[in-house]
Amino acid sequence: MIAGGANHPEVMDWDDERIIDRVQAEVAKILGIAPDPSFVHLIRHRIGIPQYEPGHSAWLAELESLCPPGLHLTGWGYRGVGVGHVAADATRIAAEIAADSSS
């Protein structure tokens, strides 16, 4: 389960027990049963997935307009954060590069 994020970054500063207790309480609320895990592993990532702010598309369009011909921007966070988004974007960029090189 993911806890904290952009809306609650203070969770990063909680001690492990507090985070685990909160997550277990949320799971109990969702499932209607109290979890009793035999194993718990907590990993903290200070930097998570990109959070698209209003205007992200306009910012990206402006950024791309500043790129010289032949320079293409792709990667995690530009046009989606899921693996499928990244793969689709990479495929699109590869097609653009192929089209540019055949011209």
Image (cartoon, grey):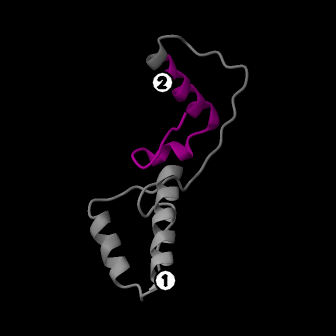
Residue 6 belongs to magenta span = yes
Ranked by sequence position, the earlier of labels 2 and 1 is 2
Q: Which residues are magenta?
A: 1-28
Residue extending farthest bottom:
68
Residue 75 screen position, x and y as percent: 51, 65
Residue 3 belongs to magenta span = yes
Residue at image position (33%, 82%) is: 65
Residue extending farthest top:
33
Instruction: Give the residue pinned by disc 1.
Output: 102
> Nearer the viewer's eye, disc 2 or disc 1?
1
Instruction: Give the residue pinned by disc 2.
Output: 26
Residue 35 screen position, x and y as percent: 59, 16
Closest to the observer: 62 or 7?
62
Q: Secondary structure at mark 1?
A: helix
Q: Amino acid at mark 2?
A: Glu
Q: Quadrant of the C terminus?
A: bottom left
